Image (cartoon, rainbow, N blue to C red):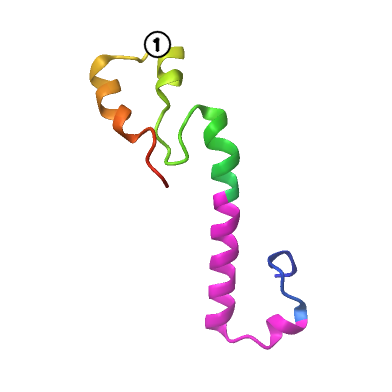
């Protein structure tokens, strides 16, 4: 739990529910960092939607597909 910002003494004083909550918050934070690092490298928006430029690059710029993903390009996560 030290990686999550808690000392061993603090963890010892926590209830099981508090430990679970702290662990969940830490994991969610780490997951968000992972999304921020990986999605753009894959050519996706932060919502996990392929960017139109990426679809064109891989030859999947079908009009039907572009019609579906275009409105999702600027959506906030």
Compare residues 54 and 7 and report the one nearer the observer. 54
Residues shaded magenta: 9-32
Q: Is residue 47 magenta?
A: no
Instruction: Choose top left, top right, bottom left or bottom right for residue 64.
Output: top left
Q: Position of residue 6 (x, y in %)?
A: 72, 74
Q: Residue placed farthest to the front in the image?
A: 74
Residue drawn 45% across and 35% down?
A: 45
Q: Main SS type for the magenta part?
A: helix
**Toward the viewer: 15 or 47?**
47
Q: Kindly identify the residue that appears in the image at 39 percent across and 36 percent down.
A: 74
Q: What's the residue at 76%, 79% (across, down)?
A: 8
Q: Which residue is mark 1?
A: 59
- Residue 13 x, y percent position in the rendering: 68, 88
Q: What secondary structure is marked by label 1?
A: loop
Instruction: Tell me which residue sits at (57%, 29%) in the image.
Output: 41
Question: Is residue 34 placed above or below 60 in the rendered structure?
Answer: below
Q: Residue furthest top?
A: 59
């Amino acid at each position: 739990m030290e990686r999550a910002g808690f000392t061993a003494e603090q963890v010892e004083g926590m209830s099981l529910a508090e430990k679970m909550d702290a662990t969940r918050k830490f994991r969610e934070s780490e997951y968000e960092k992972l999304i921020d690092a990986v999605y753009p490298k894959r050519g996706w928006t932060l919502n996990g939607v392929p960017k139109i430029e990426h679809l064109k690059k891989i030859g999947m710029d079908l009009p039907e597909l572009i019609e579906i993903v275009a409105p999702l390009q600027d959506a906030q996560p």
